[in-house]
Amino acid sequence: MNWSQLLSSQRLDQKPDATEPSRSAFEQDYDRIIFSHPFRRLQDKTQVHPLPEHDFVHTRLTHSLEVSSVGRSLGKRVGEVILQRHPELQKEFSLFDFGAIVAAASLAHDLGNPPFGHAGEDALSDFFLHHPHGQSFESQVSQGEWSDLTKFEGNAQGFRLLNKKEYGLKLTAATLGAFTKYPCPAYFPERDKKRKSQKKFGFFQTESEHFKKAANLLGLIQQKENSWSRHPLAFLVEAADDICYSIIDLEDGCRLGLVSVDETVSLMASILGDQFNAEKLKKHIGLNEKLGVLRALVIGKLVEECTSVFLDQEHPILNGTFDLALTDVCSSKMALEKISSISVEKIYRARHVVEIEAAGHEVLPGLLHEFVHAGLHLVTKNPSRKYANLALLFPEDVRWAIEQNQASNYAVLRQVIDFVSGLTDRHALSMYRKIKGIG
């Protein structure tokens, strides 16, 4: 792969944009994402602590903004050295282009996450795996489509939202490539889970052609028939996410009393090493101030380490032979693994988290059951008054899309899943209670 092609500002199915001196195409991507409707919904979607009562606990929105900030720093640091190594790029690109691509892709990285976080992904999949109504569709769709339905994946849903016409985002190929951490489909029998890029999947059957177009524009290496090497900047998007959720989830856990202050300080100090100054930290009185200082130092150190790994591995990355998370091979690997272990034990399995996630496993399949019936009502014109009324709860664009795609059960189901997965946590709970007649 070569950097000139990887930094393509071409938008899919569009002629090249006229250049705007004050704002690059990649900065336009960032602006389009931040003003989009799916991005706005992240303000009421779970990060770790569902339906938080405390205003300092992160949601998907604040998490995405923070990941984007760290991503921009990683992109600019890497870009500065890449431009020195490849001076021919300097005629067309700057370090700010690298930063803007990673910032835009990072901003969008959780766009496809459903209500109730990762538990929500499992709950949407469970409808087709375990509920008789959902299971009945297996014989009506292709093998690839069934894999999509039984393995709901937020990354693939995000790629779908970025390419849906009604949102009008039309992002550059470079941003779409950097966004796609898993450049392969759900149905992929030759999947090699030792490769980080194949651990999950990055697009549904409905968007496979969109990804192929982006991959061709970017010159991504095709590994097998349906898998490609990652866009190099996807490693930085992944690192920005890994850094933020590791450190900031721990910070939230400390604020909520799930992890003690002493243990939190000790875990962060293990990353800082010689940079940690216990006496200096004591001068900061409040918990917010202490955690803020530590967080800034730790994130700065991890950004430095991940930048170093990326630059050391530039050639294997461009050749498609490097396929690991940067945080899995950086100097602080062991410290991050310990933080992850503590977070699983004390934060992700906290009682209030598990209780709300359990509710998600009831709410989301329940909504799918009702709205799949409503979607099929639009196709079959079934005389059921109940489902005629429920169909009116679909947004106008969803009803239109279902009516346009009524020849394909998979396309109808995809639209219904878009609707349910796009709900915020509170909206999903509220709608479930109303249609089930719960006060």
Image (cartoon, grey):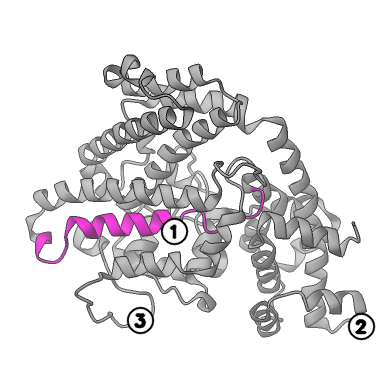
Which picture quadrant has residue 240? Answer: top left
User: On residue 48, which mark appears?
Assistant: none
Q: Earlier in the sequence, mark 3 or mark 2?
A: 3
Around disc 2, counting alpha carbons within 10 Å, would you say few (fewer than 14), some (14 to 19), or many (20 or more)? few
How far, Cα to Cα, is label 3 from label 1? 26 Å
Q: Amino acid at mark 1?
A: Glu
Residue 439 vertical position relative to residue 336 in the rendered view, above or below: below
Q: Is residue 193 magenta?
A: no
User: On residue 383, which mark appears?
Assistant: 2
What percent of the width, then of the height, locates residue 337? 46, 25
Q: Earlier in the sequence, mark 3 or mark 1?
A: 3
Q: Disc 1 vs disc 2: which is toward the camera?
A: 2
Residue position marked by numbered label 1 in the rendering: 225
What segment carries the magenta color?
Answer: 89-116
Around disc 1, counting alpha carbons within 10 Å, would you say few (fewer than 14), some (14 to 19), or many (20 or more)? few
Instruction: Describe the element under mark 3 as helix, strand or loop.
Output: loop
Q: Disc 3 vs disc 1: which is toward the camera?
A: 3
Q: Is residue 101 magenta?
A: yes
Please state the total of marks drawn on the protein image: 3
How far, Cα to Cα, is label 3 from label 2? 43 Å
Q: Amino acid at mark 3?
A: Gln
Q: Earlier in the sequence, mark 1 or mark 2?
A: 1
Residue position marked by numbered label 3 in the rendering: 14
What percent of the width, then of the height, locates residue 279? 33, 14
Instruction: Describe the element under mark 2 as helix, strand or loop.
Output: loop
